[in-house]
Amino acid sequence: MKEKIGAKRLVVGAHHGFADWLMQRITAVIMALYTLVLLGLFLSSENYDYEHWAGLFAHPVFKIATFLTFMSLFFHAWVGIRDIWMDYIKPLSIRITLHVLTALWLIGCTVYAAVILIRL
């Protein structure tokens, strides 16, 4: 008769590990590239007045890049905060409430960022 050694591992969770890891890396690269471009523009500029920077952010390509960066930031935050809620908040009702509040906050931030960029 064979003896079973050790307990069977109970697999739980949402099983998004690799996809979440990959999205965190992709969004981090997008934010890092945008930061390097912005830093390069700042360091290469001799004109630091409002009109120069407003003109830069008014350009359609820069608006799209800025919005993509904000979307990356918000998605990056969502994955990180969601994982924190899933790992450390055990009561389901509190965890779901925190997920909903976090999602609403990030959706509000996305809308606010879009409104700001549209008005420029």
Image: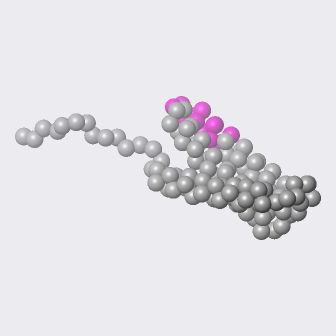
Residue 25, compared with residue 92, is above or below; it is below
Q: Quadrant of the C terminus?
A: bottom right
Residue lying at 53% horizontally and 39% vertically, measured from the top left: 86
Q: Please say which color scheme the image uses.
A: one colour
User: Residue 76 location in percent, x, y?
Assistant: 61, 50
Residue 91 magenta: yes
In the image, taking residue 66 as reference, residue 9 lies left or right, namely left
Give the image location of residue 103, x and y in percent. Answer: 67, 46
Task: Answer yes or no: is residue 66 visible.
Answer: no
13 or 77, which is in the foreground? Answer: 77
Please state if 38 lies on the left or on the right of 10 as rendered: right
* Residue drawn at the location 7% of the way across and 40% of the way down: 1
Residue at 56% across, 37% down:
85
Q: How many marks?
A: 0
- Answer left or right for 70 relative to 48: left
Does any portion of residue 112 appear in the rendered image? yes
Give the dominant element type of the magenta stretch: helix, strand or loop.
helix
- The x and y percentages for residue 49 are 91, 54
Residue in the image at 63% along x and 52% along y:
75
110 or 92: nearer the eye?
A: 110
Q: Quadrant of residue 40?
A: bottom right
User: As rendered, which of 53 and 98 lies closer to the eye?
Assistant: 53
Q: Quadrant of residue 54?
A: bottom right
| Magenta-highlighted residues | 90-101
Asked if residue 86 lies in the magenta stretch, the reply is no
Q: Give the x, y percent position of residue 58.
A: 86, 63
* Residue occupying the far left of the picture: 1
